[in-house]
Amino acid sequence: MRSIRRRLQKLSRSFPTLQDTGPELWRVAALSHLSSEDLFLLRDVNAKQNSSPVRPLNELESRALEAYYSALELESRRPASSELNASSR
């Protein structure tokens, strides 16, 4: 078992670590712009979307969802950072 771990560790060192430069980074950056209240409301929105039948959103939840989409749009339009540009070369 120990030798297998060592082999896996050596093998993992031979592969470069990949950086996510796509939508996942935009999502994380967008979420970082939201208030904790909006984050809690988005969690509730997600729970409502997964319930059956789907319940309508209240005004606060709608605003939180709108704030998330707005922040996501801003992040997607932001120029890529120099760190991300360097990793893609």
Image (cartoon, rainbow, N blue to C red):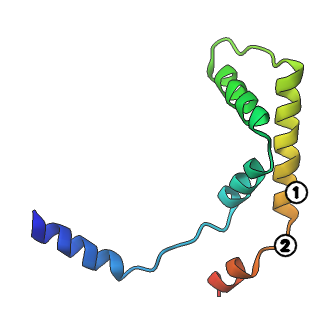
Q: Position of residue 38 (x, y in %)?
A: 79, 34
Q: Residue at x 85, y 17 (%)?
A: 58
Q: Residue at x 82, y 59 (%)?
A: 75
Dot placed on the residue nearer the N-terminal end, 2 or 1: 1
Q: Amino acid at mark 1?
A: Leu
Question: Tag 2's secondary structure?
Answer: loop
Pick the front one: 31 or 79: 31
* Quadrant holding the N terminus: bottom left
Residue 11 against residue 61 in the figure, above or below:
below
Q: Is residue 32 left or right of residue 3?
A: right
Residue 88 against residue 6 in the figure, above or below:
below
Q: Residue at x 75, y 82 (%)?
A: 82
Disc 1 marks which residue?
A: 74
Q: Position of residue 18 (x, y in %)?
A: 52, 73
Mark 2–mark 1 distance (CA, rounded to whole Å): 10 Å
Residue 86 against residue 2 in the figure, above or below:
below
Q: Give the numbered dot on residue 38.
A: none
Q: Residue at x 88, y 47 (%)?
A: 70
Q: Amino acid at mark 2?
A: Pro
In contact (CB < 8 Å): disc 2 and disc 1: no
How packed mark 2 is, by other alpha carbons closer than 10 Å (few <14, some 14-19, many 20 or more), is few
Question: Tag 1's secondary structure?
Answer: helix
Disc 2 marks which residue?
A: 79
**Residue most toward the front?**
36
